[in-house]
Amino acid sequence: MTEYYVLWLKILGKLKDYLHKMKRLVLLRHAKSSWDLNVSDKDRPLTEKGINRIRMISVNSSNILSGADLIFSSPANRALHTACIMMNSLGLSFTKIVLKKELYTFELSKLLDFIYNISDDYNSVICVGHNPAFTEAISHLSKRDFNHLPTSAWAELNFSQTKWKNISDGKLKLGIPKEILK
């Protein structure tokens, strides 16, 4: 009996190690931004509505947005401001944020290249960025037909794979503001 118990504990330990290494990706689209100022696309600020919405989404989605090892953000003003508001709202350490110019993209291929090259040292990451790349990545990585990720919305993808370069067929969970903030 004791031998079986010891064997069972070893199996559970290996399973726990494996599950801990499975990859989790959250794609958070930046909050509503303004077109009112005569600035470059990269410098567009958030609107007041966008600021308030991402604050509420963050608090109401803390179970999804709090557990990441690292938070990658596009350097665009609207994406970085979104990431900072989320982190501040949740009391997260700003040491977790990393700006990545590669996330200032609207192209699926460039976004996937970035994701596939994330260090396997990180099992759970959030990327804050832009459409249409985020919407297309959700469809591609979940193998589900998905139309549009609204501003301040998130998509959580859980993968059975343990290496970022191999992720596919992710289990999708969506956080859409109109549903979260009812």
Image (spheres, rainbow, N blue to C red):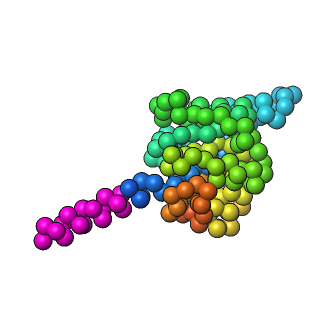
Q: Nearer the viewer, residue 26 or 44?
A: 26
- Can you name the residue that lies furthest to the right here? 38
Q: Position of residue 176 (x, y in %)?
A: 60, 52
Residue at the location (31% across, 58% down)? 13
Q: Is residue 110 above or below residue 102?
A: below
Is residue 58 part of the magenta span, yes or no?
Answer: no
Judge whether residue 80 can be spotted in this image.
yes
Quarter of the N terminus within the rendering: bottom left
- Count of marks, rendered view: 0
Residue at the location (20% across, 64% down)? 6
Q: Nearer the viewer, residue 18 or 143?
A: 18
Q: Nearer the viewer, residue 13 or 180?
A: 13
Is residue 15 part of the magenta span, yes or no?
Answer: yes
Q: Position of residue 72 (x, y in %)?
A: 61, 39
Q: Position of residue 9 (x, y in %)?
A: 24, 62
Q: Give the quadrant of residue 18.
A: bottom left
Residue at the location (49% across, 42% down)? 69
Q: Give the quadrant of residue 167.
A: bottom right
Q: Position of residue 126 (x, y in %)?
A: 57, 45
Magenta residues (range):
1-16
Q: Main secondary structure of the magenta part?
A: helix
Judge whether residue 156 can be spotted in this image.
no
Residue at the location (49% across, 30% down)? 93
- Position of 161 with respect to 33 (left or right) is left
Q: Is residue 144 above or below residue 99?
A: below
- Can you name the residue that lies furthest to the front here? 3
